[in-house]
Amino acid sequence: MQTKLTLRLDAVLIEQAKAQARRNGKSLSQLVADYFAQLGETPAQSSLPPTIAALKGALKRAGANLPDEQDYRAYLENKHR
């Protein structure tokens, strides 16, 4: 359930927050909600940006099916010949 929250802040700070929200493609409410959500996280959880944290664990190592560092080095060597 969403509830309305009223904040009283300096006008300059509000404009800076709105600009930051625009740069991130979010609403000011979403920016504040993301910040509040981070307040409850442990330091290990909040060390990654939200977008990266959402992707964490998406690809599980499937043995030899996924390329490793050696495969990537070979790819780069071939690419730059």
Image: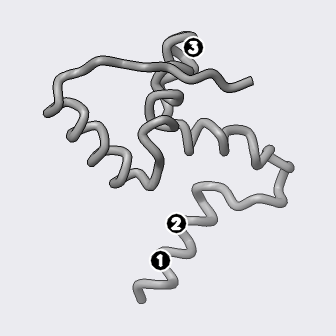
Q: Nearer the viewer, mark 1 or mark 3?
A: 3
Sooner in the amino-acid sequence: mark 3 or mark 2: 3
Q: Are marks 1 and 2 in contact (CB under 8 Å)?
A: yes
Snapshot quadrant of residue 2? top right
Q: Quadrant of the N terminus?
A: top right
- Identify residue type, mark 2: Arg
18 lies above or below 11: below
Q: Judge the density around disc 1: few (<14), some (14-19), many (≥20) Cα neighbours within 10 Å.
A: few
The residue to which callout 2 is attached is: 73
- Identify residue type, mark 3: Glu
Identity of the residue furthest to the left in this view = 12
- Identify residue type, mark 1: Glu
Give the Cα separation between the discs numbered 1 and 3.
42 Å
Query: x and y percent of residue 35 in the render?
Result: 46, 25
Circle on res. 77? 1
Give the Cα separation between the discs numbered 3 and 2.
37 Å
The residue to which callout 3 is attached is: 41
25 lies above or below 60: below
Q: Quadrant of the C terminus?
A: bottom left
Query: x and y percent of residue 23 in the render?
Result: 34, 54
Residue drawn at the location 36% of the way across and 53% of the way down: 22
Residue drawn at the location 47% of the way across and 77% of the way down: 77
